[in-house]
């Protein structure tokens, strides 16, 4: 059945996007740990404390901003992961001021595929530019996002 095949293809795209986001988070985490280890080995304990405080604060702020405005867990996780991927490539990803998805999305997997592809394309286009940034705006009207 072609419909089932298309559905599986979209689901695979969604899963691939989430795996890419997790890979970027793992890579960024490893870099941070290496930096922290280097600071500690050099005896720079105050700098290590400042580094950890800053890193945790930035990640928590991004995650809190997303989960405050996007209540669907799959879409929120995607956006937090994509923000990490974008940052790794020198692009800042922010939510537009009017963004609000107060409830779970009817078809989160489909929306994850669409938003993931749009953010990937925007990241590719913006990477390498001075002060590169992406702004994602989402809103719901009834059951439509």
Image (cartoon, rainbow, N blue to C red):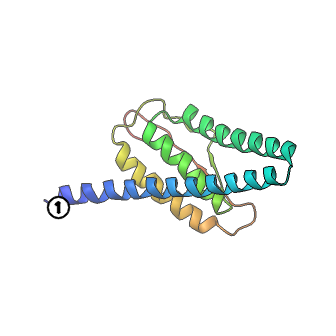
Which residue does the numbered mark 1 point to in the structure image? 2
Measuring from the top left, give residue 109's x and y in whole percent: 36, 47
Q: Locate residue 93, reporting x and y percent.
A: 63, 51
Q: Residue at x 56, y 39 (%)?
A: 99
Q: Residues within 10 Å of mark 1 (few under 14, many from 20)?
A: few
Question: Can you say whether 37 is above or below 101 in the image?
Answer: below
**Between residues 94 and 39, which one lies in front from this camera angle?**
39
Residue at 53% in and 35% down: 100
Residue 113 seen from this side: yes
The quadrant of the rendering that contains the N terminus is: bottom left
Instruction: Give the left or right position of residue 18, taking residue 126 as reference.
Output: left
Give the left or right position of residue 49, taking residue 100 as reference.
right
- Give the residue drawn at x 51%, y 36%: 70
Can residue 98 be spotted in the picture? no
Outermost residue on the left side: it is: 1
- 68 is higher (above) or lower (below) than 2: above
The one of 27 and 136 positioned closer to us in this rendering: 27
């Amino acid at each position: 059945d072609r419909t089932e095949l298309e559905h599986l293809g979209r689901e695979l795209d969604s899963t691939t996007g989430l795996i890419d986001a997790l890979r970027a988070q793992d890579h960024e985490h490893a870099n941070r740990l290496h930096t922290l280890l280097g600071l500690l080995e050099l005896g720079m304990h105050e700098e290590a404390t400042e580094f950890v405080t800053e890193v945790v604060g930035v990640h928590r702020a991004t995650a809190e901003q997303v989960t405050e405005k996007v209540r669907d867990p799959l879409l929120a996780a995607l956006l937090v992961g994509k923000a990490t991927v974008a940052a790794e490539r020198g692009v800042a990803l922010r939510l537009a001021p009017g963004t609000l998805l107060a409830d779970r999305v009817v078809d989160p997997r489909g929306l994850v595929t669409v938003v993931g592809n749009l953010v990937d394309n925007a990241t590719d286009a913006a990477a390498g530019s001075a002060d590169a940034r992406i702004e994602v705006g989402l809103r719901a009207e009834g059951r439509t996002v």
